[in-house]
Image (cartoon, grey):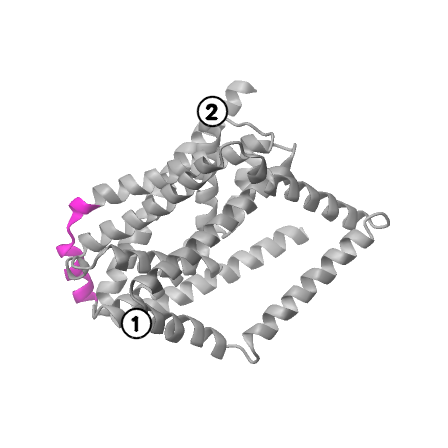
Amino acid sequence: MKGKARDIVKYVLSLALAVFLVWYAFRSVDWGSFLDGLRQTRWVYLIPFFAASIGALVFRMFRWQALLKSSGHPVSHLTVWDANNVGNLANVAIPGAGELLRCGIVTGKQGYGNVFGTVVMERVWDILAIILMIVGALFLDRDKFGPFFRDQVWTPLSNNLNFSLWWLVALLVILVAVFFWAVFHYRDRNRFCKKVADLFGSIVTGFASFREMKRKWLFFLYTIGIWGMYLMMCFSIQKAVPELASLGIEDAVFFTAVGNLAAVIPVPGGIGAYHYLIAVSASTLFGATWETGLLFATLQHELHAILVLILGALSYLGLSLRKKRVG
């Protein structure tokens, strides 16, 4: 019951943050202008958007499957595809829950830690990709994007803290170090510490799956494919919104980088956080109206969410039917 209560509290707080961010982003919207922009949207560009969205999911399926195979857990394409889709569906409701759920789908009760390690490896490479996107945006137009990251992202984050961000980072590093020292020091004398140590060992084994891959170049190609598809999704929506149609691929790089920063804010599916960051970017850097920025963010976010919901429901149904047949 305590675990369920804790999960409920986390979800309620996460949902409350999402509601606040949505309200904050839409609080002063001129709905007439917003709806007028929606009517002017060039819907033909949604074809490449959805094609790129599915392409990103396919590349993710291949990449995770390659990691699972190298970690000693070969899984079929269909199972990995369904696990990813159901995991994405869960993430829409509870951030992070999907990662745990998809691991359980492909492993059952065996080797969970190893499989979770492959997910950690995936996320590390995704973080590196986001960093490269940000660096790429700065390289393509440092005078425009540099001040934005400083004034709209870094400065507000630093000012909202009562002490230096670096002191916070140092404190977190120390706490994590003390926790792992205690776990491994007392693992032979404490049941909880032993379980944590065993799980951490399994995660490290799964994390090392990348080292065991025979064709690492495929992993890199899959990762490039994933983020190339994300870039194409963003570029397609730029073309769909007339006021942003003149923007180039370098601007899509920037929007993709900024949009993915919303992923670090623990709200369901990035709702609110994504809209705010994109709207600020469009209105601050490109002279678009706030309504146009929100339209761009809404099209990109909600259309992708609809695809995630449909594919997640179909995959859940498929998994259930296959489980019944096996049973």
Q: Is residue 94 above or below residue 319?
A: below
Residue at the image point whose x is 21% and y is 69% from the top: 289
Is 36 a magenta residue?
yes
Quarter of the figure with residue 311: top left
User: Which SS class for mark 1?
Assistant: helix
Quarter of the figure with residue 274: bottom left
In the picture, the disc for residue 221 is none
Q: Position of residue 246 (x, y in %)?
A: 16, 59
Q: Is residue 293 above or below residue 163?
A: above
Q: Amino acid at mark 2?
A: Leu
In the picture, the disc for residue 143 is 1
Distance, label 1 to label 2, CA atoms, is 55 Å
User: Which SS class for mark 2?
Assistant: helix
Quarter of the figure with residue 205: top right
Residue at the image point whose x is 32% and y is 60% from the top: 254
Mark positioned earlier in the residue sequence (1 or 2) = 1
Q: Position of residue 54 (x, y in %)?
A: 33, 38
Q: Is residue 153 above or below residue 163?
A: above
Q: Position of residue 46 (x, y in %)?
A: 22, 45
Residue 269: in sight, yes or no? yes
The magenta stretch is 31-45
Q: Closest to the observer: 302 or 8?
A: 302
Q: Position of residue 177 (x, y in %)?
A: 70, 61
Q: Quadrant of the C terminus?
A: top right
42 to the left or right of 22: left
In the picture, the disc for residue 321 is 2
Q: Residues within 10 Å of mark 1 (few under 14, many from 20)?
A: few
